[in-house]
Amino acid sequence: MLQLIHREWARTALSIFNDKWRKKYEVFANYVMPPWWAHGLILTEEIRYNYQNYLPVREYLSDLEWVFLKSFNDQTLVPSSVSNQHYKSLPDFWLILPLEFQGNITLKLGDLFSLACAIASPIKFGSKPNRYPEQHDYMLNWLTHVIDSFIIGIEYGCSTGHGTYEFAGVLKRSGKKGIVLGVTTESLEIWMAKNKHIPHLNGRENCNYLSSDLYDKHSTFFVAGDLRNFRLSRKTDIMVVNGLIGGPAFHSLIELTRIWEKIQSDMKTNGLLVVGNHFHDGYRTYQDSFCKIGERFSKLECQIGNSFFFKMK
């Protein structure tokens, strides 16, 4: 953190930020009768209306982004989602954060980096160990039947990297050599993946990473990028896309078709595409559409649990 956050710059920016929002909160508290939002309280439209009137979320996050930009030595680490947001109110934003950040209008210097990490990788969307265990055995079996001895693998939406390390572990267990690349849009998630450290969880949840002796650390890499336009120098044998396709990120028919076209251009013939999700049933029709569109590009080999396995044409 000391190398990533310039403490003096951060202290100055936070002083300006806290002074402004402390005054705005005082006005809010004087004019809005309780109940004010707190963890566990049902978030109603009336509560949202009151917060938006006095503490508008877009203005708050714009100011928070300014604090991050002033504080980070490397501005590429500022979470992009702090500006690319569609929260209805400030309490809606708080709900993606760990408990210790919920309800806080002003911020402490020592919490700034952890808050940035929590915004970049919200708990409800972030990766965790062994999230898709059904994928590992299938991929291992597939690898044992592949003639090629050197494998190129990529995971899109790798978040904080647990799945990518597990992917690399499967490759090592297969006895084959290769490269495994984890890709996510948030540079701060890449930092967490490379360092195997998730500050906003701080060991309070099961977030242990795969032991480094179980994968080839010299052939496991992470880079910031987007599935829609990330360019590979070589076609890949295995592609894993978890928590993205058929959910909030990509679900329109146009998006799903373009993703299939991108996937086909990036993968070898007979390569393995693995798509996993834990979306609620409201997104099931989008998953079905993805499989239907994919008939032009692949053959659905099977579905196990929350994972789909495709053989590319």
Image (cartoon, grey):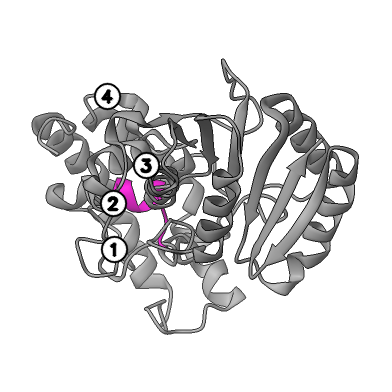
CA distance separating discs 3 and 4: 14 Å
Q: Are marks 3 and 1 in contact (CB under 8 Å)?
A: no
**Mark 3 against mark 2, which lies toward the viewer?**
3
Residue occupied by mark 2: 115
Element at badge 4? loop
Q: Does label 3 or label 2 sit earlier along the sequence?
A: 2
Residue occupied by mark 4: 74
What is the magenta range? Answer: 115-123
Where residue 184 appears, x then y in whole percent?
48, 38
Up/down of 140 relative to 91, above or below = above
Residue occupied by mark 1: 101
What amino acid is at disc 1?
A: Phe
**Mark 3 against mark 4, which lies toward the viewer?**
3
Image quadrant occupied by the N terminus: top left
Is residue 261 at least partly visible in the picture?
yes
Of residue 137 and residue 274, the one placed in the foreground of this image is 137
Asked if residue 204 lies left or right of residue 237, the reply is: left
Q: Does label 2 or label 4 sit earlier along the sequence?
A: 4
Asked if residue 284 lies left or right of residue 40, the reply is: right
Is residue 19 at least partly visible in the picture?
no
What amino acid is at disc 3?
A: Glu
Residue occupied by mark 3: 189
**Circle 3 residues within 10 Å: few <14, some 14–19, many ≥20:** many
| Magenta residue check for 296 | no
Q: Does label 3 or label 4 sit earlier along the sequence?
A: 4
- The number of discs equals 4
Where residue 175 appears, x then y in whole percent?
41, 41
Element at badge 2? helix
